[in-house]
Amino acid sequence: QVQLVESGGGLAQAGGSLRLSCAASGRILSINVMGWYRQAPGKQRELVATITIGGSTNYADSVKGRFTISRDNAKNTVYLQLNSLKPEDTAVYYCNAEVVDIRLTRRHYWGQGTQVTVSS
C-alpha cells in the first residue's frame, strides 16, 4: 500500500506565498510522475502542475510564472511553491503520484487534499 500525505496549505493574502509538500510512503519501487491538482467549490478537479522523475515539468496556463513544482526523488516528495497568489487560486489542492510498487504494479495514488484559501 502507498500513502500520500500533504502539508502546507492554509490562508494567504493576495500576492502572498505558500509552499505545499507531499510525501509518498509505502512499498515504492519508483514514482514516474508526481503532480498537483486542485478543485474549487462547484468546479471540476483540474491539473496545476506535474513533474517527471527526470525533472521535466508541465504547468496549467493559469499558474505559469507564479507556481513552481519540484521534487526530491530520494525522499519521494513533491513540492509546490505558490507565489503571487490570487483569490481564484482558492481550492483544495491534491497530490497525485504514478507509482510502480515492488510487485511492478503501476497505479495512481491521491493525497487527502490540503486547503488553500487566498483572501483579497
Image (cartoon, rainbow, N blue to C red):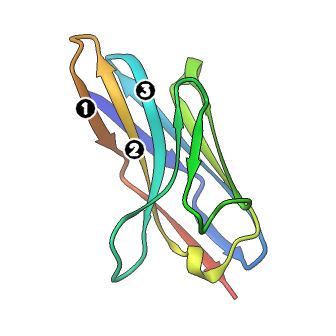
Q: Quadrant of the C terminus?
A: bottom right
Q: Residues within 10 Å of mark 1 (few under 14, many from 20)?
A: few
In front of the other: label 2 or label 3?
A: 3
> Badge 3: few (under 14), some or many (20 or more) residues near its Cα, within 10 Å?
some
Q: Amino acid at mark 3?
A: Asn
Q: Are marks 3 and 1 in contact (CB under 8 Å)?
A: no
Query: Looking at the picture, how far across and down is residue 24, in whole percent?
Result: 43, 31
Disc 1 marks a residue whose amino acid type is Arg
The residue sitting at 37% across, 47% down in the picture is: 111
Q: Position of residue 10 (x, y in %)?
A: 60, 66
Decide: is 35 above or below 60.
above
Q: Using the numbered discs, state the Cα–Cα distance from disc 2 to disc 1 in whole angstroms.
A: 10 Å
Placement of the N terminus among the 4 image quadrants: top left
- Label 1 belongs to which residue? 107
Residue 39 figure quarter:
bottom left
- Secondary structure category for the residue under label 3: strand
Looking at the image, do the residues carrying marks 2 and 1 touch, with CB atoms under 8 Å apart? Answer: no
Q: CA distance from mark 3 to mark 1?
A: 10 Å
Is 106 displayed left or right of 118 in the figure? left
Q: Callout 2: 10 Å neighbours few (<14), some, many (20+)?
A: many
Classify residue 15 as left or right of residue 72.
Answer: right
In primary-sequence order, the first of circles 2 and 1 is: 2
Label drawn at residue 15: none
Q: Amino acid at mark 2?
A: Asn
Q: Choose between 65 and 107: the one closer to the eye.
A: 65
Closer-to-camera residue (113/35): 35
Q: Which mark is residue 32?
A: 3
> Which is more N-terminal, label 1 or label 3?
3
Task: Please tell me whether mark 1 sits on a helix, a strand or a loop.
Answer: strand
Residue, disc 2? 96
Question: Percent position (x, y) of residue 104?
Answer: 24, 13
